[in-house]
Image (cartoon, rainbow, N blue to C red):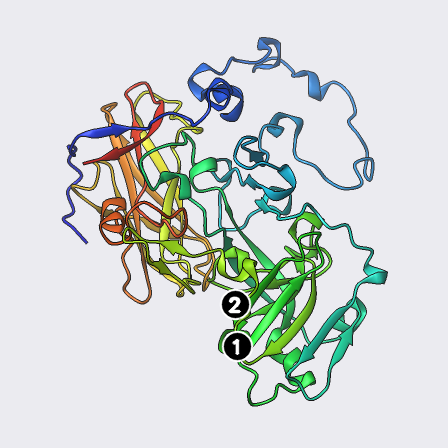
Amino acid sequence: MGNETDGRGGGGIASRRGFLKAGLAAGGAALAGGGTALAREIGNPDNLPPNVPDWSRYLGDGVAVRAYGKPSQYEGHVIRRDVEWLTASRESSVSFTPIHELDGPITPNGLCFERHHGGIAEIDPRDYRLIVHGLVEKPLVFTLEDLKRFPRVNHAYFCECAANSGMEWRGAQLNGCQFTHGMIHSVMYTGIPLRNILAEAGVKPNGKWLLLEGADAAGMTRSVPIEKALDDVLIAYRMNGEMLRPENGYPVRAVVPGWEANMWVKWLRRIEIGDQPWYHREETSKYTDLLEDGSARKFTFVMDAKSVITSPSPQMPLNHPRGFTVISGLAWSGRGKIAGVDVSIDGGRNWRRARLDGPVWNKALTRFYFEFDWDGSPLLLQSRAIDETGYVQPTKDELRKVRGVNSIYHNNGIQTWHVMSSGEVENVEVS
């Protein structure tokens, strides 16, 4: 995986082209959570040792005062954020997970990115029904309570929008990994293997495709081949132990492990089994990858191996001048487990193996760390993921040579962060 030195170097740096609207650039301090760590002020000196701090002088709230727990008020900047100019309507837009502020492999429910086509459907669970029909022996209708009576399983999976990193195809654009890579989350889902529900209905021999339809205002539909449906697709109603959040599909959604998130139909109300994909549905064919010659890659369902360094990154600068430094990041693959992650501090000239920490689950986010002594020199940080199939995450230029720059989907190219001597970080590309 390259030699084991950690010398610096690298080619020329192509700086990001700036945010695509001045308003986003002007709001940079707010997007970074109120400014860089280097500029954070010390709090009240009266609260510092050896003084007795204010919070030790009086009783705090008792139990059940905060009936549903919330983060500390001092972590109020750790939120999902959207880019208002990204789409014409916020009901058909996306918000981004603040992955730079998180650690470990699990995403808190309140921070999981959102992608809607017709806004959030607010469904009374008493009125919820799931219809299974088409090429089946016995059409069925399930209530939520019916579904909960099936034997259930728990699995952690990542969910990544096909357009994650899509703004970066033509060069470095958005200065923060929340915006370059934040259309992803990984949670522990509780639900039913779809194959068990299909077994109840009895799929006919000519049933080869499933149409999944959501109950949102867009009537979101996607076609899923029967082989995937019988493999690992879940009909889920819980995430990280609690019921799904409305923005994540309450009360029931499809979980399609390793495949692009637009297949994970939320507010799932109908499953129709047919003998072919639903080509006539615009939604079924819109997520294609347009190539340089005008042709398109279709059925690019699988999300290939990918990684990103989350800290340091543009919204998470280094707050110390030099010395022992921890690099932290995430890796994932839609084809299985992460086998390893390499880190470079010199723009890809030399690579060192990172340390995987915590559970390494199949088709889920994996946390990696790399520790080193920083001497204060500028860095060009990169990471590359290797999955259990042997696939190695490519560079952006390698992808562009094959696919061009006409698509906004399936960009799993290596990300580069330029760490300056000041500790500030910028999104760049190296040549």
Residue 276's disc is 1
Residue 265: give x, y in percent of width and height. Answer: 61, 60
The residue shown at (57%, 34%) is 81
Quarter of the figure with the N terminus: bottom left
Could you tell me the amino acid type at mark 1? Gln
* Secondary-structure class at tag 2: loop
Task: Identify the residue position indicated by label 2 in the image.
Answer: 279
Q: Position of residue 51 (x, y in %)?
A: 61, 12
Give the structural element (helix, strand or loop) at label 1.
Answer: loop
Q: In the displayed structure, does residue 304 sit left or right of residue 251?
A: left
Instruction: Point out the residue furthest to the right here.
Output: 126
Where does residue 49 sit, x and y in percent of width and height? 56, 15
**Which is more toward the observer, 201 or 331?**
201
Residue 244 vs residue 66: left or right? left
Circle number at residue 287: none
Q: Callout 1 environment at 10 Å: few (<14), some (14 to 19), or many (20+)?
A: some
Residue 298 in which image quadrant: bottom left
Q: Quadrant of residue 53?
A: top right
Q: Amino acid at mark 2?
A: Tyr
Depth check: 428 or 359 in front?
A: 428
Above-or-below relation of 131 to 108: below
Q: Which residue occupies 70% across, 76% down?
A: 132
Side of 205 relative to 218 (left or right): left
Q: Is residue 243 above or below residue 370?
A: below
Q: Nearer the viewer, residue 427 or 99?
A: 427
In front: 362, or 48? 362
The reply to whether the C-beta atoms of the residues labelled 2 and 1 are less than 8 Å apart is yes
On the image, the x and y values in percent for residue 184 come to: 50, 48
